[in-house]
C-alpha cells in the first residue's frame, strides 16, 4: 500500500515537472502517456490522462492517446529492406520478426509479472519489517521525544542559568568597576585630605603666630587705650571745668544781652515816639508848604501885570522853600 502511495506521489511529481517543461497541452499529454506506459508499466486511458493533467477538453487526451498507440504500433513493426529480397518475402520476414518481437514482449511481460509477484512478496515481507521497524522507530521516537523534551528543558534551564550567570558576571563586573571607582575616589580623597591636613596645619601655625602677634598688639593697644582713657578723663575733667566756666560766662553774657535788649527796646519805643512827633511836624510842614504854594500862586497871579517881582519877596520865598526841604530831609533820615 505504501508503494502505491509512493508511485502515485512520484507520478504526481513527474507530471508537475512535465507541466513546467512542456507548456503545450498536446505535447504534455503525449509525454504523460509515455511516462505511464514505459516508466510505470500502466496502459494509459483518456480518463486517467485527463484526471492527471486537467488541461483542455476530454477529446484532447483521447486524440493524443490514439496517436500514441498508432506511433507505438508503427515503431513495433520491423521493416527488412534488402535489394535482393522480393517484396512479399520481405513483408513475410517483417511479419515474422514482429511476431517474434510480440512473443518476446509477451514472455518478457510474463517474466516481469513473475518478477513483480516475487518483488511484491519481498515487498510485503519488507513492509512487515518496515512496520516492525516503524513500531520500533515509534518507540524510539517516543523515547527520543521524551529525551528531546528533557534535553530542551535542560537546555532551557542551562540557558536560564547561563543568562543568570551572565547577569551575575555583568553585575560582578559592574560591582568590581564600582569598587575600583570608589577605591580610586577614596584614594583621591585621602590624598586630598592629607593635602588639606597639611594645609590646615600650616594655616593653623600661621593663625597661632598671627594670634600671638595680635595678642601682643592687643596688649599694647590696651596699654595705649588705658593711657588714652586717662588722657581723655583728664581732658573731660578739663572740658567740664571749661564748660562750667563757659556756662557761667554765657549766663553773664545772656544777662548783659537781656539788659541790652531791654535798653534797645526802650530806645526803640522812644524812637517810635519821636518818629511820630516828627511825622506830625512833617505833616504840618507839608500843610504849610501847600499853603505857601497856594499863596505863591496867588501872588504870581496878582503880580502878573508887573513883569518884575520885588527881590525881597523872591528871597523870602526861596528861603521858605529851602527851610521846608531841609526839615523834610531831616525827618526822612531819622529812624
Image (cartoon, rainbow, N blue to C red):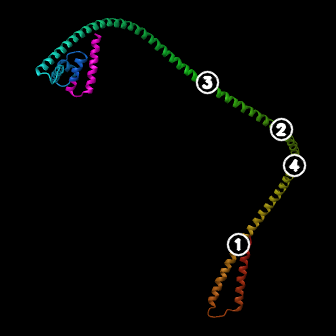
Circle nearer the N terminus (3, 4): 3
Residue 28 colored magenta? Answer: yes
Q: Position of residue 149 (x, y in %)?
A: 44, 12
Q: Range of the magenta residues?
A: 1-29
Q: For the residues marked 2 and 1, what is the alpha-carbon distance in whole angstroms?
A: 92 Å
Quick check: 220 above or below 113?
A: below
Q: Position of residue 262 (x, y in %)?
A: 79, 60
Circle nearer the N terminus (4, 2): 2
| Residue under pointer 2 | 209
Circle nearer the N terminus (2, 1): 2
Which of 10 and 297 lies nearest the eye of the viewer? 10
Label 1: how many Cα within 10 Å (few below 14, some 14–19, many 20+): some
Q: Secondary structure at mark 2?
A: helix
Which of 229 and 299 lies nearest the eye of the viewer? 229
| Residue under pointer 3 | 175
Give the mark toward the camera: 1 or 4: 4
Q: For the residues marked 4 and 2, what is the alpha-carbon distance in whole angstroms?
A: 38 Å
Q: For the residues marked 3 and 2, what is the alpha-carbon distance in whole angstroms?
A: 49 Å
Label 2: how many Cα within 10 Å (few below 14, some 14–19, many 20+): few
Q: Secondary structure at mark 4?
A: helix
Do labels 4 and 2 touch, CB within 8 Å?
no
Circle nearer the N terminus (1, 3): 3
Q: For the residues marked 3 and 4, what is the alpha-carbon distance in whole angstroms?
A: 80 Å
Q: Secondary structure at mark 1?
A: helix
Give the mark toward the camera: 2 or 1: 2
Q: Is residue 126 left or right of residue 278?
A: left
Residue 235 shows which numbered tag? 4
Quick check: 152 above or below 27?
A: above
Q: For the residues marked 1 and 4, what is the alpha-carbon distance in whole angstroms?
A: 61 Å
Which image quadrant for residue 293?
Answer: bottom right
Amino acid at each position: 500500500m505504501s508503494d502505491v502511495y509512493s508511485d502515485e506521489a512520484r507520478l504526481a511529481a513527474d507530471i508537475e515537472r512535465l507541466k513546467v517543461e512542456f507548456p503545450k497541452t498536446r505535447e504534455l499529454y503525449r509525454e504523460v502517456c509515455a511516462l505511464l506506459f514505459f516508466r510505470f508499466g500502466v496502459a494509459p486511458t483518456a480518463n486517467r490522462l485527463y484526471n492527471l493533467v486537467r488541461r483542455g477538453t476530454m477529446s484532447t487526451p483521447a486524440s493524443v492517446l490514439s496517436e500514441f498507440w498508432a506511433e507505438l504500433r508503427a515503431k513495433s513493426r520491423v521493416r527488412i529492406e534488402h535489394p535482393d529480397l522480393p517484396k512479399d518475402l520481405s513483408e513475410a520476414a517483417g511479419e515474422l520478426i514482429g511476431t517474434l518481437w510480440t512473443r518476446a514482449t509477451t514472455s518478457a511481460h510474463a517474466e516481469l509479472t513473475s518478477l513483480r509477484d516475487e518483488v511484491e512478496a519481498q515487498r510485503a515481507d519488507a513492509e512487515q519489517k518496515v512496520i516492525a521497524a516503524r513500531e520500533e522507530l515509534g518507540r524510539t521516537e517516543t523515547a527520543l521525544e521524551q529525551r528531546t523534551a528533557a534535553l530542551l528543558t535542560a537546555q532551557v534551564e542551562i540557558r536560564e542559568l547561563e543568562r543568570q550567570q551572565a547577569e551575575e558576571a555583568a553585575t560582578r563586573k559592574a560591582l568590581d568597576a564600582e569598587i575600583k571607582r570608589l577605591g580610586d575616589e577614596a584614594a583621591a580623597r585621602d590624598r586630598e585630605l592629607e593635602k588639606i591636613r597639611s594645609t590646615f596645619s600650616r594655616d593653623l601655625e600661621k593663625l597661632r603666630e598671627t594670634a600671638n602677634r595680635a595678642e601682643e598688639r592687643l596688649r599694647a593697644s590696651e596699654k595705649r587705650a588705658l593711657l588714652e582713657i586717662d588722657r581723655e578723663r583728664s581732658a573731660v575733667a578739663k572740658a567740664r571745668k571749661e564748660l562750667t566756666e563757659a556756662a557761667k560766662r554765657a549766663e553773664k553774657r545772656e544777662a548783659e544781652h537781656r539788659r541790652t535788649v531791654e535798653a534797645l527796646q526802650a530806645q526803640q519805643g522812644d524812637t517810635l515816639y519821636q518818629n511820630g512827633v516828627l511825622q506830625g511836624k512833617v505833616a504840618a510842614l507839608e500843610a504849610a508848604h501847600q499853603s505857601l504854594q497856594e499863596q505863591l500862586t496867588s501872588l504870581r497871579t496878582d503880580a502878573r501885570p508887573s513883569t518884575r517881582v520885588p527881590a525881597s519877596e523872591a528871597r523870602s520865598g526861596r528861603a521858605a522853600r529851602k527851610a521846608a526841604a531841609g526839615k523834610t530831609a531831616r525827618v526822612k533820615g531819622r529812624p
